[in-house]
Amino acid sequence: MNVLDKARVILYRYHEKSLEVFLIKPKAGEDPNVWKFPKASKDKKQSTHCIALDPVKIDDQYQLNTIAVEADWHDIPSIRGLVRHDINRVKSKIKSTIPEIEEGTYIALKDAFKKVLPQEYAALKELKDVLVERQSTSNI
């Protein structure tokens, strides 16, 4: 599977009254100013809680597909009542779905805009707009 056959995943959360997104830190030898979204295979079944964002055309042949999921992966192991087996199953499922999960961190959305590539910037802007609209309609 080609890198361009994969989808980008924006993991987001509300933390301390601001929106944060999960970004992967650059590896050694890469531009330290360009962080990335995690990748996931397109063939994975999408949850109903996903926000499918508009695809961004990279060139005539490829487009970048992006989905957003509200998630705070660090809370999963602390949920009371889960048995050890279930925790390990959840962790392995997350790692198999998003292999780069250990290499990233959550960053405030306003800072993430400065760290991502232009086509990823558009996806973050759309996510922000969708979430602002959801928040405004839920308060009616």
Image (cartoon, rainbow, N blue to C red):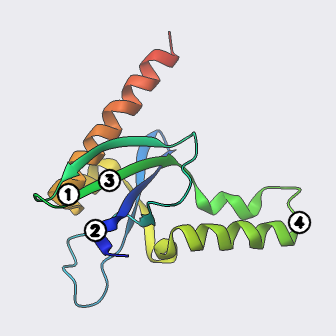
> How far apart are the two marked residues, 2 and 4, measured between alpha carbons?
38 Å
Q: Of 10 and 108, which appears nearest the observer? A: 10
Residue 63 visible to the viewer: yes
| Dot 1 alpha-carbon crowd within 10 angstroms: few under 14, some 14 to 19, many 20 or more | few
| 77 vs 103: above or below | above
Question: Foreground mark, 4 or 1?
Answer: 4
Q: Is residue 9 above or below residue 85?
A: above
Q: Tell me how far mark 2 sits from mark 3, CA to CA.
A: 9 Å
Q: Position of residue 80 (x, y in %)?
A: 85, 55
Contact check, label 2 and label 3, Cβ < 8 Å: no
Q: CA distance from mark 2 to mark 1?
A: 23 Å
Label 2 residue SS: helix
The circle on residue 4 is: 2
Quarter residue 39 falls in: bottom left
Label 1, label 3: how many angstroms apart (C-alpha)?
Answer: 21 Å
Query: How much space separates mark 4 and mark 3, taking CA atoms?
Result: 35 Å
Tell me where residue 95 sits by quadrant. bottom right
Q: Which residue is mark 4?
A: 83
The residue to which callout 1 is attached is 114
The residue to which callout 3 is attached is 65
Residue 125: image location, x then y, percent:
26, 41
Q: Is residue 15 above or below residue 115?
A: above
Residue at x 31%, y 32% (from the top left corner):
129
Mark 4 crowd level (few <14, some 14–19, many ≥20, 10 Å Cα): few
User: Which numbered mark, 2 or 4, is in the foreground of this view?
Assistant: 2
